[in-house]
Structure formats: structure tokens, C-alpha cells
Amino acid sequence: MGISSNRIIGLTQELSIEKSCNVVDLHIGWQNEYEAQQQKDPSGHYHRAPVVTWQRDGITYQFVPTLTFEETAKGYKVDADQLVADIEEQLLTRGVKETEAA
């Protein structure tokens, strides 16, 4: 059984997220790097989550989001809006000093 690895977030959207979250060098990569990227939908099909890397104040951060799924007539697909929201939440909180977050 194959792994779905469609690029859900394009480069234009990636740049928009980078600017709105005030980070630098944001990269949402879909290449297979970590086992945690292979995630199953409720029907048992695998999907590849991205590796998200960015910098804030000279420190590099990285995480693999947990995918959520929507049921469609053709099975399950990754909830793209939730994926963007989860990425933005990490970008807005990790490495942010308390005075910046307030």
C-alpha cells in the first residue's frame, strides 16, 4: 500500500505563513525523513506529514505535525486547514519570549 504524500501547502502559502508568524527560513518539507511522518487515516491508509523547520532569534526549530483527516466520498484526506492552523500555532509559540507573546 502506497503513502499519500501530496504537497498540501504550496510555496506561496508557506511564504505567507512565514511572514504572518514572524519567523525566518520556514520550510515545510514533504521528503521522507522521520518515521513520525508516516501517519494512518481511520481507514488504515498512510499519509506523509511534513517536517516543519524555521528559525527565530538564530535558533532553529523543527517538528512533525499530527495529521487530522476529513472523510470524503473517496475515503479520507488530510484536513489542510487544520494542518495550517497546527503549524501556525507552533510558529507563534515555540521560541517566543513571554514578553513577546503577551
Image (cartoon, rainbow, N blue to C red):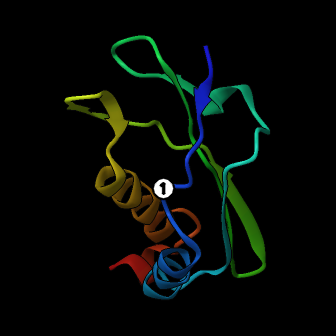
Q: Position of residue 18 (x, y in %)?
A: 54, 80
Which residue is the site of mark 1?
A: 8
Q: Residue at x 43, y 85 (%)?
A: 20
- Which is nearer the eye, 30 or 96? 30
Name the amino acid type tagged 1. Ile
Q: Quadrant of residue 52?
A: bottom right
- Which is nearer the eye, 3 or 38? 3
Q: Quadrant of residue 41?
A: top left
Q: Quadrant of residue 77?
A: top left
Residue at the extreme front of the image, as rendered: 74
Left or right of 74 on screen, residue 34: right
**How many dots with numbers?**
1
Q: Position of residue 29 (x, y in %)?
A: 69, 56
Left or right of 54 on screen, residue 44: left
Q: Residues within 10 Å of mark 1 (few under 14, many from 20)?
A: some
Q: Is residue 49 above or below residue 35?
A: below
Q: Residue at x 47, y 76 (%)?
A: 13
- Which is nearer the eye, 72 or 80? 72
Figure quadrant of the N terminus: top right
Q: Position of residue 64 (x, y in %)?
A: 60, 43
Kindly state the secondary structure of the residue where label 1 is placed. loop
Figure quadrant of the C terminus: bottom left
